[in-house]
Image (cartoon, rainbow, N blue to C red):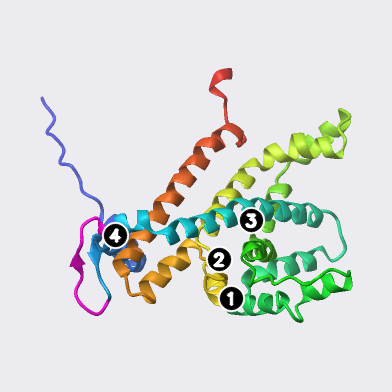
Amino acid sequence: MTALPQKRRGPSGVKRAEWRDGWLFAMPFLIGVVVFWLGPMLYSLFLVTQDWDMLGPPRFVGLLNITNALNDPLVSKSLYNTAFYTFIGVPLQLLIALLLALALNQKLRGRAFYRTIFYLPAITPAVAFAVVWMQIFNADFGVFNNILRALGLPGVNWLFNPDIAKPAFILMSLWTVGPQMVIFLAGLQGVPVELLEAAEIDGANSWQRFWSVSIPLLSPVIFFNLVIGIIGSFQVFNNAFIMTNGGPQNATLFVVLYVYLNGFRFFKMGYAATLAWMLFWIIMIFTAFQFFAGNRWVYYEGKVDKGTE
């Protein structure tokens, strides 16, 4: 006697209700992604081949925008400015953030207050941030120049000297290392005390414990801050737009600012879209390189080296 084949049962009513509710709750997010992210991104890709001034219909120009970008001296200038800001500023930001985290990880009186104070500048509105630093950098009565004059040194035209403007922006960026500091603090508090005590028993001093135990365990945190810092610094815009508008002599003309100027001041949206996609691929390449290089120096707990299996 052969058993009759059982019919394949579909999802129950409860399961279908869960799916329906899940899609309904996810729908606002999905609509937002399509309307405000994927849609504009695809349209900007379309604009790469167009000449559009936002007044008339787009006009197809083929690869002209790409050719113009490759021959535009301001593109190379903005890339140089952005690279200078990134590859000098980001390591300094990480160093300052790590030093602050080490100091605020000690048992200090009022430690929570100091952590809050060092984090607050990171949530300051962009306009207020720029106005404060314009006063600090003021050539006549700015805080920095008053300190230099008190030491018998001449004042500096921080924002009006092409050779000083980019270092001034890097100096200003050190004021907003609060998020990196908090992440480093979390990483330091995750270092097992047992390993530090074992190293101390073996005769390691404070520096050796920090370099040989804490730093390897902090490497994923350092890697995360490095990747996020480089991505963010490649998109620097607010301070340059508010404080210098790219000057003096294009010394602070960063890539995102140049994209904005082409799109909303010169009304060359096709060219601006081309520059935006160029920046996108530059960031993607640098991020991929960091992940490739990170496999050589980032230590993940529980990771097994294939060469030692």
The residue indicated by pointer 1 is: 243
Query: In the rendered structure, which disc, 3 or 2, sits on the residue that comes first in sequence?
Result: 3
Query: In the rendered structure, which disc, 3 or 1, sits on the residue that comes first in sequence?
Result: 3
Badge 4 density bin: few <14, some 14–19, many ≥20, Cα 10 Å: many
The residue indicated by pointer 3 is: 89
Front disc: 3 or 2? 2
* Magenta highlight on residue 305: no
User: Residue 65 — which label?
Assistant: 4
The residue indicated by pointer 2 is: 252
Mark 3 to mark 1 CA distance (whole Å): 18 Å
Residue that appears at 58% across and 75% down: 243
Q: Amino acid at mark 4?
A: Asn
Work out which quarter of the rendered image holds the N terminus and state it.
top left
Q: Position of residue 181 (x, y in %)?
A: 69, 57
Mark 3 to mark 4 CA distance (whole Å): 31 Å
Label 1 SS: helix
Please, what is the dominant secondary structure of the magenta stretch? Answer: loop
User: Residue 133 — which label?
Assistant: none
* Magenta highlight on residue 63: yes
Label 4 SS: helix
